[in-house]
Structures are given as C-alpha cells and as structure tokens.
Image: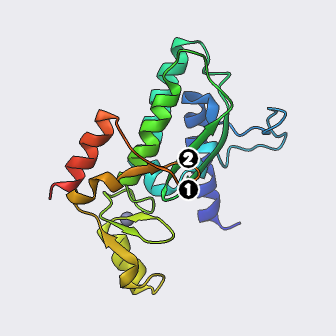
Amino acid sequence: MKIEEMIEKRRKISENKKLIERFPFLLPRNRWTGEISEDYDYTYTELDEMPNGWREAFGEQMCQELKEELDKFNFTDKYRIIQIKEKYGTLRWYDGGYPVGSKIQDIINKYEDLSMCYCYRCGKPTKYRTEGWIEFFCEDCKNELIEKKYYHEDSFVKLSKEDLPQRIRYKDGCEIELSTDPEVLKIVKENWEE
Ligand SMILES: [Zn+2]
C-alpha cells in the first residue's frame, strides 16, 4: 500500500469512528443476525451506501434528526438500517423498525422527497431529470454527462416551476404522489426560483 493510501485509510477510519460514535446505527451489521463482523475495521459505514451528493447535502443532518427522535424513545442503540439506496432517482432508506408513536417514518419520507432536490452526484440543486431511467441532475453534472457521452442532450428534461407536480415521490410500483411535507415543498420552491 502506498503511503498516501495508508494516510487516507487512517483518515477514513478515524472519521468513521467518530461518525459511528454519534450515530451508532451506522455501524455495519449482519442483516439477519445483527452481529458485527469480526474483521470490521471501520473502513466503511452504512452511510457509504448513500450516493455522495446526497450524503454531502443532507446525509449527516438526516442521521442527526433520526438520532434525536430515537433518543426520545431510548431506541438509538437498537435502531438498525436494512438498506440505503437510490430508486427512481430518489433516496430509499429501509430500516428494521422503530418505536410506535415516533416520527421516524416522517423523517425518512421527508429526506426521500428532498433527495429529488439535490444532485446525487455532487449535492447541488437539481435542474434536470432524465426520461425513462429517472435520475435528477444539477446543471454541471448534466453538462459533464453529455460531454462524456454518457447521455444524449435529448435525454434531459429541464425542470421548471411548472414541473412542481413532478417533484414527487415515485413510490414502489411507480405510483406517484406529491410530497405534502411543507419543509420539502419550501425547499423545492426555493430551488426553482432562479
Ligand atoms: Zn451535480
């Protein structure tokens, strides 16, 4: 291993230790047994499953909100993440359950909706979406993807304020639903007003 790689690895490990201290549910565990792998070395956490742009835009903020809510129910150490991924251009956050009466699902819904407003590659506000395979991109990433010929210019639809009803959560089964979270709608509107 090169010296730079070793330094980078050490930096990552120390960063991840701090992250897991703050948010214990980011500690990777076996999905079925809940056990921590014997050779776990802090080189990764559950949050690494979240695309970089979203992680930068709201990743830790989302964890913080979840933690504060979990703390109220004394559930922070019991909370388990099942999967974090992207689907239909937006975030999906699956967990192993939470206390009845908590706002955990509301917090997850809010950030799943919000993910549409942030480019998953870099975290800047989204201005375009692709058709067919739905993804949301900022201006810069759109240009870069066209330049690199990953996408054709025609693949992108410019989002505008009139598209607001399209800023929706693509629920599983492709049903669509307009987000009603006032905080989400506020951010969507702010992103739209140029
Ligand atoms: Zn971008």
Taking 71 as reference, is 166 above or below it? Answer: below
Give coordinates of residue 161: x percent, y percent.
21, 57
Q: Residue at x 45, y 87 (%)?
A: 149
Query: Mark 2–mark 1 contact, CB under 8 Å?
Result: yes
Question: From mark 2 to mark 1, how far is it between C-alphas?
Answer: 7 Å
Q: Classify 10 Å Cα crowding around label 2: few (below 14), some (14-19), many (20 and above).
A: many
Give coordinates of residue 32: x percent, y percent.
83, 36
Residue lying furthest top in this view?
Answer: 73
Taking 23 as reference, is 75 above or below it? Answer: above
Relative depth, front residue between 119 and 48: 119
Relative depth, front residue between 163 and 11: 163
Q: Residue at x 39, y 45 (%)?
A: 114
Q: Tell me the residue that label 2 is attached to.
A: 92
Q: Tell me the residue that label 1 is attached to.
A: 87
Specify the quadrant of the image occupied by residue 31: top right
Q: Quadrant of ligand 1?
A: bottom left
Q: How is the image coloured?
A: rainbow
Taking 130 as reference, is 107 above or below it? Answer: above
Q: Classify 10 Å Cα crowding around label 1: few (below 14), some (14-19), many (20 and above).
A: some
Is residue 127 rendered to the left or right of residue 110? left
Kind of residue sitting beneath label 1: Lys
Taking 38 as reference, is 150 above or below it? Answer: below
Q: Residue at x 27, y 44 (%)?
A: 187
